[in-house]
Image (cartoon, grey):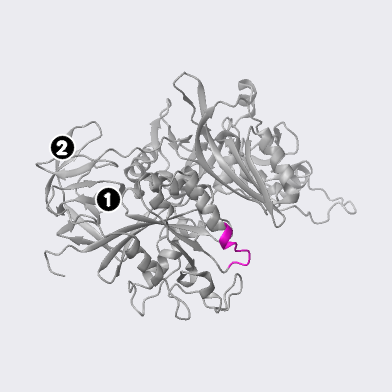
Amino acid sequence: MSKNEKQKIINIAVIAHVDAGKSTLVDAFLAQSGVFRENEAMTDCVMDSNDLERERGITIYSKNCSVMHGEYKINIVDTPGHADFSSEVERIIKTVDTVILLVDSSEGPMPQTRFVLQKSLEQGLNPILLINKIDKKDARIKEVVDEVYELFMELDANDAQLDFPILYGIARQGIVVRDPSEVTDLEVGEGESKVKKSAAGQNGLNIMPLFDTIIQHVEAYPDRREEPLQFQISALGYDDYIGRLGIGRVDRGTIHTAEQVAVTKEDGSVVMRKINQAFVYRGLKRVAVDEADCGDIVVVSGISDITIGETICDAQHPDPLPMIHIEDPTLSMNFMVNKSPFAGQVGKFVTSRHIKERLEKELEVNVGLLVEPLDTTDGFKVSGRGELHLSILIENMRREGYELAVSKPEVIMHRDEKGHKVEPVEEVVIEVPDEYSGTVISELNLRKGMMKSMSGRDGRSRLEYIVPTRSLLGYRSQFINETRGEGTMVRRFAGYEEYKGEIPKRANGVIIAQEEGTTSGYALNNISERATMFVDPGVKVYEGMIVGMNSRSEDMVVNPCKAKKVSNMRAAGSDESIKLSPPRVFSLEEALEFIADDELVEVTPGDIRLRKKLLKELDRRRSGR
């Protein structure tokens, strides 16, 4: 390619519901485009580089990579599928030329699918549909395609958008075909597949039909290099060595290293800044370049106060693009200094200054977050898009050595134009075996949910509800128990509706430790007759720590450290070995769901404990708790 000839660039985003195979499809793109050397080991879901992403099997942070196909450079954005990270998805859509809509051949379109597709259609993009996992035993390919057509029509897609190409694939084996019958000769299937899982394709089949469809379906970005620079920031990054990074697509012009530019702010003001370095993506690597052309996804350093939605322009021609609106937080919780008797025993960062610095660092890249100081000097009110959004932050802090106490999540209320109180509601899609559907319907009705539709097939019921976000706090654990782990529940933010009134709270009281000490099997055996325990024998506890759940509605103070009195008399049958049921162990999300308004979750690098806000029983009585 001659120096004056512009490189052909196409930017694509892979959008889908959680666990539909986005990251696996990106693996296949990378494996079949020569990004990896022959002797280089390739891990599954290579784009999910964060430890939490690997453990949970979800994409949390959107990331970029690029592949070459012939003379085309294809920038690929792997987007989060979970609704709590919708602010990430929304902005990414603005930087791409088309989206690959990935839909599971059995599940069909899910709530998050609807959300990301809606954002794509609003941007005027013409999607490509890829029905994934066509080797599933319960695949219903034809019905799912019909459901996607219906979804496009519901979302007011125009004629060009409705005329979308349809492909079929098995992303984990690196296969995409134009007709499902092309894979009938493969010995594929769920479970013990006879074909080795590989992103590099099988039996002469690969993902080339998808590459070809992208190039036929999308025109390369037009050559606008002669126009003045216009480059909107759609994502932020942070590098310990070079500081804050701005990421986005260059809409027009060319960006250069060490260039003086104008940055247009949200309030309409214009400030002059200097770009330090510019980077583009080659494969998975971020590579420094002297200049980057329009159409490419570029990372710039050197502008310490750059933020989402601001436009970097030619110094002589400041011409901003419309600001990107980031959706408001729906949920808040208090992050406070850990003041329990066990504070500081494990964590390295325990003061309010440490917590403040860590939250400020998070704000550098996590624009869906809002941090405000509390009236007291030892905590902060942190607001985000949902439980998962906030719990991921807490989990990351815990792993980095922070200790903190966290309050129960609270929904953020608003007032409408008439001054009426409104609250966030969520669209919930539930699939359960038919025998549990009555229990779930009854519970959601109690929680002020409104059923939208109910259908069923193969012994399973599919329920669609609109439910207040408040009602769903603490429901997931109960849902898993009521459906014996066989139900699935997915949710997404749907908007604001009129305040629904009082909602039933946790029915059970808790068991509270009376004193500091080490739990004994003898004491726990006596207590467990009327409670579900959260601790094993030999665990250190303190006064005010929650050690179990009462079978009744009131709280109960007990001594879990009480030992059996020692005497030289033995009673037949009473000294047999004690058999205790395994304690209930909470994950961070389950702990946040479980606690009541007068309780806290104590988060340390080693433990997650539940406690009362007021540790002493006398203080709780005086306050009426």
Amino acid on which the number 1 mark rests in the picture: Gly
At 41% across and 50% down in the image, what residue appears? 159
> Would you name the residue on which mark 2 appears?
271
Looking at the image, which is closer to me, 141 or 598?
141
Q: SS at mark 2?
A: strand
Give the total of numbered labels: 2
Image coords of residue 322 (percent x, y): 27, 38
Q: Is residue 403 visible?
A: no
- Image coordinates of residue 215 in percent, x first then y, are 32, 64
Q: Is residue 139 left or right of residue 29?
A: right
User: Which mark, residue 248?
Assistant: 1
Q: In this view, does 282 lie above or below 362?
A: below
Provide residue 595's location: percent of width, then percent of height. Answer: 60, 37
* Magenta stretch, residue numbers: 136-143
Above/below status of 195 relative to 162 = below
Residue 579, magenta (yes or no): no
Looking at the image, residue 170 sits to the left or right of residue 565; the answer is left
Label 1's element? strand
> Within 10 Å of the Cα at label 1, are there few (<14), some (14-19), or many (20+) other Cα atoms?
many
Most extreme residue toward the front, as rendered? Answer: 159
Mark nearest the camera among 1 and 2 is 1
Task: Reply above or below: 360 against 569.
Answer: above
Residue in the foreground of this view, choosing between 166 and 468: 166
Which quadrant does the C terminus fall into?
top right
Q: Residue 125 carries which label?
A: none
Residue found at x 32% / y 54%? 97
Task: Please say if 307 is above or below 28.
Answer: above
Left or right: 200 with respect to 109?
A: left
Dot 1 or dot 2, earlier in sequence: 1
Q: Are marks 1 and 2 in contact (CB under 8 Å)?
A: no
Between 279 and 362, the one lying in front of the other is: 279
Would you say the magenta stretch is mainly helix, strand or loop?
A: loop
